[in-house]
Amino acid sequence: MATNGLNRTAVAAVRSMIYQTLKWAFTPPDERMLRTLQSDEFSKSFEVALGALPISPDGVGLRDAWEGVRRALSVYTAPQDYEAEYLRLFEVGIPSAPCPLYESTYGPVNRREIMEELTRFYNHFGLSLGQKAKEMPDHLRVELEFLHYLTYLEAQALEEGEAAAGLRRAQRDLYQRHLDAWTPRLWAKLQPLSSPVFSAWAKLAQAFFQDESRRLTREEDA
């Protein structure tokens, strides 16, 4: 697969940066984060990152999706308005928020099994949420942070000439056992909720996840 002139180390680093950005998208925003996401400097660097990914049928789609995020973000002049939208969708509601960001909400595996398996995943790579963690293991933000970490380790291993196949297998397993199973239901639930900005983020995340899952599966089958 073509990589636009970048080696595998650089591609892994770019993917890590994209996972970090998507984690920000589904984090309660503060003023600094919103201003960063709205800045021309960040937008240009993110466009470069998307353009550096291996060429695939979804490459243009990702850039178009990012442009949709940029347009939707531009209407927010007050960070509290963006935060209110986040809370309305993901955290506040009776009996629950309209669109929870927890894998166990979407089944079909029971909550205990999901938590136990994800905890084993994280612990295997030396990560622990600890008793003071703000989120449960199955929160989208935590799963994105884990993928950010794995791709960071992958880039580091490749830079040092070490094997990275195990790290890629872990990424593939997280998709096949978790993200592929529940995030399509999350995106489908989010789309009718009349939120241009988070619908745009969802479109970008969905396109990137699909591309990543296919790439990791092709590597497995090769």
Image (cartoon, rainbow, N blue to C red):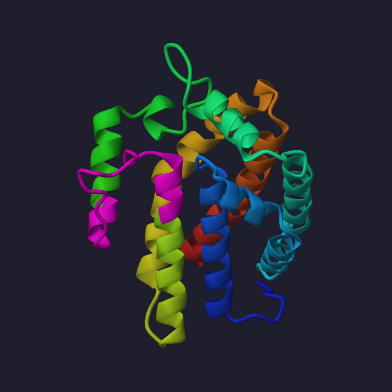
Expressed as whole percent of the image width and height from the top left, the position of residue 119 reads 25, 47
Q: Nearer the viewer, residue 40 or 161?
A: 40
Relative horizontal placement of residue 79, taking residue 76 as reference (left or right): left
Expressed as whole percent of the image width and height from the top left, the position of residue 93 reads 48, 16
Magenta region, residue range: 121-145
Q: Nearer the viewer, residue 108 or 201?
A: 201
Q: Dominant secondary structure of the magenta stretch? A: loop
Residue at 27 percent across and 62 percent down: it is 125
Residue 127 visible in this rendered orientation of the protein: yes
Q: Is residue 132 magenta?
A: yes
Residue 107 visible in this rendered orientation of the protein: no
Residue at 46 percent across and 62 percent down: it is 220
Expressed as whole percent of the image width and height from the top left, the position of residue 203 reads 67, 41
Residue at 44 percent across and 17 percent down: it is 96
Q: Nearer the viewer, residue 5 or 38?
A: 38
Residue 6 appears in which quarter of the rendering? bottom right
Residue 46 appears in which quarter of the rendering? bottom right
Is residue 117 placed above or below 218 in the rendered structure? above
Find the residue positioned furthest to the top.
94
Residue 69 appears in which quarter of the rendering? top right
Residue at 29 percent across and 29 percent down: it is 111
Relative horizontal placement of residue 4, taking residue 142 as reference (left or right): right
Find the residue positioned furthest to the left.
131
